Amino acid sequence: MLGPYSPAVAAAGLIFVSSQTGVDPATGAVPEGLFEYECRQAFRNLEQVLRAAHAEPADVVQTTLYYTDPADLSVLNAVYVETFGSDRQPARSAVMVGLAGGRRVAIAAIATCRQSNH
């Protein structure tokens, strides 16, 4: 962890997911090679945090995508559609930034809670 934060916080019927990068939790490293590998890992990490908070990608209502290279946007868009589908997509912001540790993508999200105890 790069700082003091929670992967997700539930409040007011929503789940706020902190930015998820493409770090593989099994290795603690970003997958080497193509941007697509890192991007797919970031979306897998997002899904894992959502599921731990009793939510699914279909529950996401808003995302913020942080990426470092405009040339990667087409790959990011393709993986985004694979994750959220093409019928109902969350509201979205996409921002080019510099990311810590040489990472190339991070994804934050807001989702609705599936369980009433959140």
Image: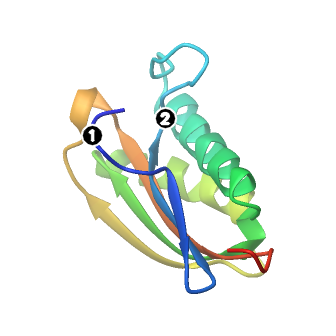
- Horizontal side of residue 1 vs 100, given as left or right: right
Separation of residues labelled 2 and 1 (CA atoms): 17 Å
Residue at figure coordinates x 53%, y 47% from the top left: 75
Compared with residue 60, is residue 30 higher up or lower down, i.e. above or below?
above
Compared with residue 98, is residue 33 higher up or lower down, i.e. above or below?
above
Q: Residue 64 falls in which quadrant of the image?
A: bottom left
At mark 1, the secondary structure is loop
Residue at figure coordinates x 51%, y 20% from the top left: 31
Residue 3's label in the rendered image is 1
Q: Can you say which quadrant of the picture contains the C terminus? A: bottom right
Q: Are marks 2 and 1 in contact (CB under 8 Å)?
A: no
Type of amino acid under label 1: Gly
Residue at label 2? Answer: 22
Q: Position of residue 11 (x, y in %)?
A: 54, 78
Residue at figure coordinates x 60%, y 50% from the top left: 46
Looking at the image, is mark 2 or mark 1 nearer the viewer? 1
Q: Earlier in the sequence, mark 2 or mark 1?
A: 1
Mark 2 closeness class: few <14, some 14–19, many ≥20 residues within 10 Å: many
Q: Position of residue 3 (x, y in %)?
A: 27, 40
At mark 2, the secondary structure is loop
Q: Position of residue 100 (x, y in %)?
A: 23, 35
Type of amino acid under label 2: Gly
Q: Residue 45 falls in which quadrant of the image?
A: top right
Residue 117's label in the rendered image is none
